[in-house]
Amino acid sequence: MGLFYSELRMNKKIVRQILLVLCLFLSYNGVQGRKKLSKSEDMELEKQLKLLNKPPIKTVKTKFGESYDCVDFYKQHAFDHPLLKNHNFHPQMKPTFAEIKQNSYGSTTNKLPTIWSKDGGCPSGTVPIKRITKDDLIRQRNMPPAEPANEFSNNDIEQKGSYSYQFNGYKRAIAIPQYDPNVTKFSGAGMATSLYNPHVEGQQHSGCRIKIQHGSDILQVGWRVDPTLYGDNNTRLYLHYQTGKTRCFNTLCPGFVSVHTDIPLDMSFEDNLSQRGGSPKEINLYIYRDTGNGNWWLLLGPDYTQVGFWPHNILNELKGFATNVEWGGVTYNPPGLPEPPMGSSFFPIGNSSLDAYCRSITVANEVGDSVGIYNVVVLTENKFAYDIQFKGLTEGSNTITYVFYGGPGISNS
Ligand SMILES: *[C@@H]1O[C@H](CO)[C@@H](O)[C@H](O)[C@H]1NC(C)=O
Ligand SMILES: *[C@@H]1O[C@H](CO)[C@@H](O)[C@H](O)[C@H]1NC(C)=O
Ligand SMILES: *[C@@H]1O[C@H](CO)[C@@H](O)[C@H](O)[C@H]1NC(C)=O
Ligand SMILES: CC(=O)N[C@H]1CO[C@H](CO)[C@@H](O)[C@@H]1O
């Protein structure tokens, strides 16, 4: 028995080493490939860069030393979308929401971080955009396929309990609202999420998000550690939308219209991360549909700062309401490599200072009123790697809902 196990371990070790060598070889080839770009490939990249990078009015720096271009509102890449050619948007645009109920009380609420150096951020009438480099484009060619778009229903989850099959490399630990006949159409969702920096390698990524969906239209906002997307291991904000054959992150393809001069969609949270056992650092994230015109807004922070919106006319099913909402963690591992850690990298035990969480989860109903969610159904796609639990905790005179999620992934040792 002992021999068998140690042999197995040995084999695993060898396999891992082979994989590692393969990876190194592949990435070495990648670097070589970079030098060997054919002339036409190179020209294609230059063309893409020219489309993506608009001439800046000014370039500013964050306190972490990253540069952002301040791009004239009207020149942003969003407006290269064929359906936005004749838009009448302007930098002072505001949504016309029914009042959003302040539902994110609690002692750990943070103000939105200021990310700019002491020289300040972008001037009004502009939006901050990270300049894309050729290396970014080459690296992003290795982005995995999008997360499968199946919509979980309460029935699916209750019947199957825990999915444990390989899901195209994606693993989720998520909560969805329990079916409520009074709220079947959603015009938004929100949460406060604690910020962590799970360790990822190679093409793995790990994060947490809100996802709202109707059929094959999906909008997401969250944070993630994703070196393939970002070229570093920082915990960063991300947006993703998919509709028809279009799927894209942040402003890498046209669609999302930024209005805020201070908030880049890929902003780093590197000095505002939670340390396990300490008081959690978090950010409030909301996606709300403007009941007036059907545009979907991204709001951020405890004051619902208006960052920008997905115009309704670039969407299909989400021209109307969402039929599904998810909160929770997602990881990706390329085939043959282990699952990375998720959240705080530990299985949740129901303590907000030890576990990663989504708290004060809300939806907006058909008429746009924000509704706290007190009953959810939870799903873990690999219960050996990740777990999730839902809990209401009394804090002062309030009950705060927590979706605790996370786990170590499949350990490498
Ligand atoms: C749905 O709304 C009706 C009428 O307001 C109410 O009586 C009922 O309790 C609600 N159902 C649920 C599940 O909340
Ligand atoms: C991210 O972290 C891994 C593991 O520490 C490291 O191997 C890799 O070089 C880092 N990637 C970047 C882009 O910094
Ligand atoms: C949660 O964890 C913290 C840090 O370890 C500890 O101080 C606190 O007592 C725990 N809370 C509960 C309710 O167990
Ligand atoms: C939102 C938040 O907590 N922001 C803090 C991030 O960290 C910096 C430096 O530690 C603080 O100055 C911010 O207030």
Image (cartoon, helix red, strand yellow):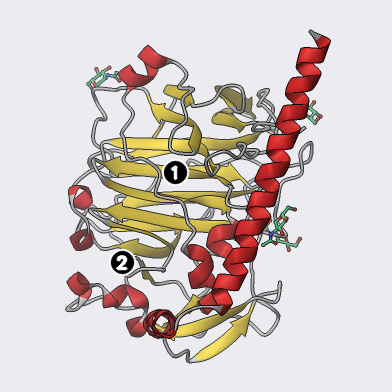
Quarter-wise, where is residue 322 in the image?
A: top left
Horizontal side, residue 173 vs residue 45: left or right? right
**Farthest residue toward the top?**
1
Question: At which x and y percent is residue 197?
Answer: 68, 49
Image coordinates for residue 221, horizontal then vertical, percent: 45, 51
Q: In the image, residue 1 lies at what x, y percent?
A: 78, 7
Looking at the image, is mark 1 or mark 2 nearer the viewer? 2
Considering the numbered disc 2 on the image, is that residue within a helix, a strand or a loop? loop
Contact, mark 1 vs mark 2 (Cβ under 8 Å): no
Query: Which residue: 42% across, 63% down?
Result: 306
224 shown above or below 251? above
* Type of amino acid under label 2: Gly
- Residue 363: tell me if it is visible: yes
In terms of depth relative to the viewer, which is nearer, 81 or 26?
26
Residue 384 x/y as whole percent: 61, 22
Judging from the image, what secondary structure is the residue with disc 1 in?
A: strand
**Cβ of mark 2 under 8 A from ligand 2:** no
Q: Which residue is mark 1?
A: 210
Look at the numbered disc 1 and say if its residue's Cβ is closer than 8 Å to ligand 4.
Answer: no
Judging by the rendered image, the residue that carries numbered circle 2 is 255
- Is 42 positioned to the left or the right of 357 in the image? left
The residue sitting at 64% across, 68% down in the picture is 114
Residue in the picture at 60% in, 65% down:
29
Figure quadrant of residue 67:
bottom right
Q: In terms of depth relative to the viewer, which is nearer, 92 or 246?
A: 246
Image-based side of 133 in relation to 211, left or right: right
